[in-house]
Amino acid sequence: MKGSFWFAASLVFFIAACNPNFYKREPSPPPTTTTSSAPVQSQKLFDQTEEKKFDKGSYELPLEVRPQDEAELQEEQTVIAQEGEVPHNVPSLEEVDALKDETPLEQDGEIQERVSCIEKEPERQRGKTPLEIGEDEKEKEITFDIPIVINDRVEYFIEYFKIKHKKEFALWLKRSGKYVPLMKEILKENGLPEDLVYLAMIESGFNPQAYSRRKASGPWQFIHGTGKKYGLVVNWWIDERRDPEKSTIAAARYLKDLYDQFSCWYLAAAGYNAGEGKIFRAIERYRTEDFWELAKHRYLKMETKNFVPKMIAAALIAKEPEKYGFTEIDYDEPIRYEKVEIPTSTDLMVIARCSEVDYESIKALNPALKRRYTPSKYPGFQINIPAGKKEAFLQNFSRLEPTERTSLQRHRVKAGETLSQIAKRYRTEVKPIMQINGITNPRRLRTGTSIIIPIPNDKASSLKDTGAKKNIEAMRENKESETAFEAIYYVVQEGDTLWDIARFHNLDVNRIKSWNKIQGDLIRPNDKLLLKIKKKEKG
């Protein structure tokens, strides 16, 4: 037996000596000696690579280390350790590490944003994010202070704005000249990224009179409850959600609160659109704080899923409109005004005359005013007048008698009269009569009581018009209204909502639904919608 054993052992060693690949049929375990530690480092490099890949299947390191190559790499490194040579075609581990350090792992913006949202790095997000644009010798650098990701959804909305809705987006760019400088300054004063101004661009197209089907109003589209929470007054007289300055201050406070909750501007923007509660529930449901992952699921509405890529697309185009085909934009002049305090209810025509400008100038600077006169019982109310007109206004206004500020008439209530009848007689409305006179219940109007009737100045001189004259004017208005509109058909594009179409064409959502007999809010691509557009707005 002993002779057979030694014969077999000798045969094995003889075969091994003749065939050096005998032991290489299976990969050997990593050597434990100090001279053979390279395979262990190689495995560690692979593990780090997998950790940084997250769930982004398309991402790869510049020098790829695949599982199926581990045995080969171990074998090569073992040969290097034993023979002391480095084959010319095999990189050393030091070279691998150098390549890893020199080449940024976050090669696409989407992974960069995911890391920022998951690891909660507000300081990095608040820094400037450079984006090089152009291939000329002197490249132009465009910077953003919000994270910028360019993916398929962002690219879709770039095309959406520059092709399908180029006319409407050009109008938004035109308006941006008027409001963006003011809004950016307010955002900066509140410590927020100035590029959040493009959130307002998507919400309203910088239209202070924008009003949505959800009863959101103004350039930042506040609903009543949220506006009140952040200090905006909404009543019969005024709607401060329409005030570009006050609504931007409120939006800055709201966005700051949202960022404090989510530490990610994409989630903050989504929360602004859908409400923070909706976003919190989405995060809890899908166990991720990555907006792009949340957008893959059905829980968030399409409007919210599209909101962030729309905002990014708007920022990209607005920063360099010529690149995207928006040339020769006639930007509005930046809005400039001074504030003056109005102690009592005053007709805007009177304020215009005291400011030595026309009525339209005053009205344009004060979109929050819903009536022709400033509110009563609003201590310290300030109105905007054109810059440089404050001194003239104060001089002219101080010479006015109180009765000259608004046309007020005294009326003695007769037996059987109601406030509605009185308001109709003086061509005004019930609410201002109630507010000026402190009437809380219109049914408790007593016979013989004297009340004050506020009347705009232009109506005061025409209260004695005959009924026939009124009828003629009404007929003329009806005739004009019939010829002032033209019917067109709009083909619904992918990504369109009724709200988008209404906003693009300066229409009301409910009217579009009525014209087309639409129940609910569902529309589909290639649907044809009847729209009645004012002729002067038709391009």
Image (cartoon, rainbow, N blue to C red):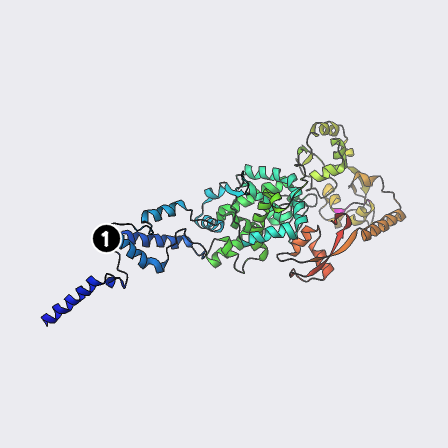
**Left of 189 or right of it: where is 23?**
left
Frontmost residue, 157 versus 357? 157
Residue 345 location, quadrant: top right
Residue 58 on image: x %, y %: 46, 56
* Outermost front residue: 18
The vertical placement of 407 against 209, above or below, is above
Q: Is residue 376 something one can see in this rendering?
A: no
At a point 53% along the width and 50% down the height, the residue shown is 150
**Quadrant showing the N terminus:** bottom left
Residue 204 on image: x %, y %: 64, 47
* Outermost left residue: 2
The vertical placement of 237 against 276, above or below, is above
**Left of 384 or right of it: where is 89?**
left
Frontmost residue, 210 versus 115? 115
Q: Which stretch appears magenta?
A: 426-430
Residue 196 on image: x %, y %: 56, 44
Q: Secondary structure at mark 1?
A: helix
Most prominent secondary structure in the magenta stretch?
Answer: loop
Amino acid on which disc 1 is placed: Gln
Query: Is residue 427 inside the magenta stretch?
Result: yes
At a point 56% along the width and 48% down the height, the residue shown is 312
User: Which residue was labeled with disc 1?
Assistant: 82
